[in-house]
Amino acid sequence: MDRRKFLKATGVAGIAGLAGCSGGPTESGSTATEESAESTSESTEAETTQESTASADSEVNVGMVYALGGLGDKSFNDAAKRGIERAESELNVSYNEGQPSAAEEFPTFQRRFAQSQNPDYDLVCCIGFAQKSALQETSKNFPDQKFMLVDEQIERDNVASYVFKEEQGSFLVGHLAGLLTNQQFEAGAGSTSGDSKKVGFVGGFEVPLIQKFQAGFTAGVEHADENIEVTSAFAGSFSDSAQGKEIATSMYEDGADIVYHAAGGTGLGVFQAAQEQGKFAIGVDSDQSQTDPNYADVILASMVKRVETAVYTSVENVAEDSYNGGELTTLGLEQDGVACVYGQELGSEIPEDVKSSVAESRQAIIDGDISVPTEPQ
Amino acid sequence: MSTQNTLTGLLERDWSYRETLVGGAVGIFVTIAVLGLLLPESLWADLFGIITERSTLSSALRLSVPIVFAALGGIFAEKVGVINIGLEGLLIVSAFVAILVPAILGPTETTLFIPNLWVGFAAGILASVLFSGLFAVVCIRYKADQIIAGLAVWLIALGLAPFAATVYYGGVNTENLGTSLPTWTIPVLSEIPLFGAFFSATPAVYAMLLAVPASWFVLNRTSFGNHVRASGENPRALDTVGVNVSRVRYASVLLSGFLTGIGGAALSLGLGQFIGNNQTMVNGKGFIAIVAYLFGNYNPIGAFGASFLFAGLEAVQIRLQQVPGYAIPDSLIQTIPYVTVIVVLALVGRTRIPEAAGEHYESGDD
């Protein structure tokens, strides 16, 4: 008897656990979740982690579907969250958020927001290039729902697409790295030797988006000095920080002074390696010397990608009835969509002449005097 | 009598198997060395340079730690007759708890004169033991299907750790502790070229180098080890001589959790941070460990060899990507460790699964 009971209990707990892993956004009307939520508390807790500030009395309701890194990634998703938070405080906007944990869940989350009647979402923000194929389907099925997509483009009237010129920002940090590796420089926990002409790049996956970072960085380094060698490697993961640490360690031991990463969580291992080796690193997406203060003593600068600008602008457009569906908005250096932001702790120690040459090349890119490649040469 | 014969036969075949593996590895190394020395400026020379570099060796040692410990854990579970495919989940749980506990207690402070880093290490192991205890109860007491229960362990851990991180940290990744496992350098010995890498490493690497022979010894030279093997091969015989099969199985599965927990705690504390997005920072290492111990035919030394091969190829692979001038896509280079392991497993793999693995045992005197 008790064995049967036990099996039943484990079965229910297992299903609830699975629901916790693969659950959609919290919405009434999902009987499966409700049932399992009654039997165990685990899944309910997992589901209610999504903040729900959406209410009927705000003017604009926004649904946020985050990229796979989830909130707390200290970069991409957190930046998107800053955008919606700013919109909330300035524009009378309410929002609900969903954090898919696997690519297969994107359609579910998008559809839930699009279907919802209470609240009726005015805009669904889809963060990250990985949502493109899912959104192609969803936006076709819900022609009256407004969507916005970050990092990719879908040509449909109900999708406003926002892309960044990551290569431009990467060019600037590459220029910075190239200038610093050529001179003796010591600050915080790191130093450059000045005699080795080598810098490194660590990417998450070898995909076109990440290659834009790589291409811009390489071009920037070459702009500083043609003889500097740029080594690059890909970790094959955005979350394997141990791998990131090993890659960066091998680069530093090989004589690289500065390593730039575009690898999400994997990149945190790069900072760790920089600290152990007494070298420098460059962050990505957010100002990582601020979001990861423990590493501020090795982060020279970060290639900041203002996802918050994209989110805020799109929400603002909807609030002001000027939604630009079907259009592609490109945010580069000129629009301040990408930027080279110096580290909180090390920024002040970087020589002025280096900073001014970086500022010069920024202006040159805006003026069109320097064209930055988007693919590795 | 016949058992004796089978055992001798097994031992003999085991030897020739090992010889094939070791001979093959040495053969490949010599080929690379000869080609590398004959053709400088070629891919072979670069490869030879990478393999003989000290940093590659220390990198391989660090990368193999979680895989080796999980593989040892897997051996103890499967040898006793409980197939534990939840190793990945145990790694995730221990990796997370090992960071969470010091973060709560204060990473640089001490509790009862023990630095909290080590308290976290112990807590990570404990979490893994508790999880494997749950798994053991479900599989042994309640006779659940071991594969399904193992999958449940993985899935629950995969959901639970990022969820708990979200509750405590507000995101799936934990904050950085600001401290991580130190490097212990043994004077003089660490000066040896190349192999000095064995003497300048984190405590986890030393623990691994001790745990492998110790596991072999426990499994093959102690009465507990005999009971473990008997329970996996012929539990009725073990029962007949008056040993409680369930007890042996519980002990061995808990030991499996203990060993895997060391691997998980070492993984996250090596960085001072737990990354919880996608497949978490464990990223399939538990499953690689399963391949490793099958590859090593349930022998701790063999499992270490297989894990080390994989980790070594991984260390070579990330360096090979950085060699400029070859038109090989990096994504292709990244697959080298996986492809090699599959090829070797297919060509020379000879795994004999314990007779009673996956089967429940009814002692009949309940």
Image: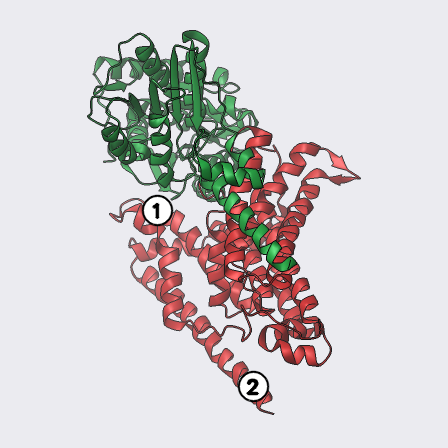
The shade of chain A is green
Determine which residue is flagged by label 1.
B321
Q: Is A58 displayed left or right of A42 in the figure?
A: left
Q: Quadrant of the N terminus of chain B?
A: bottom right
Name the amino acid type tagged 2.
Thr
Query: In the orientation shown, which residue stands out farthest toward the front?
Result: A1
Residue at left offset 35%, top offset 65%: B343
Height in image: B28 above or below A60? below
Q: Is B269 displayed left or right of A228 in the figure?
A: right
Of labels 2 and 1, earlier in sequence is: 2
Cβ–Cβ under 8 Å for marks 2 and 1: no
Name the amino acid type tagged 1.
Gln
Mark 1 is surrounded, within 10 Å at the Cα level, by few (under 14), some (14 to 19) or many (20 or more) other residues, namely many
Q: Position of residue B269 (x, y in %)?
A: 60, 42
The shade of chain B is red
Q: Nearer the viewer, residue B207 or A346?
A: B207
Residue B8, numbered label: 2
Res B195 quadrant in image: bottom right
Residue B231 in view here: yes
Height in image: A349 above or below B280? above
Mark 2 is surrounded, within 10 Å at the Cα level, by few (under 14), some (14 to 19) or many (20 or more) other residues, namely few
Q: Nearer the viewer, residue A64 or A72?
A: A64
Q: Is A65 displayed left or right of B232 in the figure?
A: left
Per the model, the C-alpha gap separating discs 2 and 1 is 46 Å
Query: In the orientation shown, which residue stands out farthest toward the right?
Result: B112
Q: Position of residue A169 (x, y in %)?
A: 33, 22
Residue at left offset 54%, top offset 46%: B157
Q: At numbered mark 2, what does the secondary structure look like: helix, strand or loop?
A: helix
Height in image: B332 above or below B348? above
Res A212 quadrant in image: top left
The count of marks equals: 2
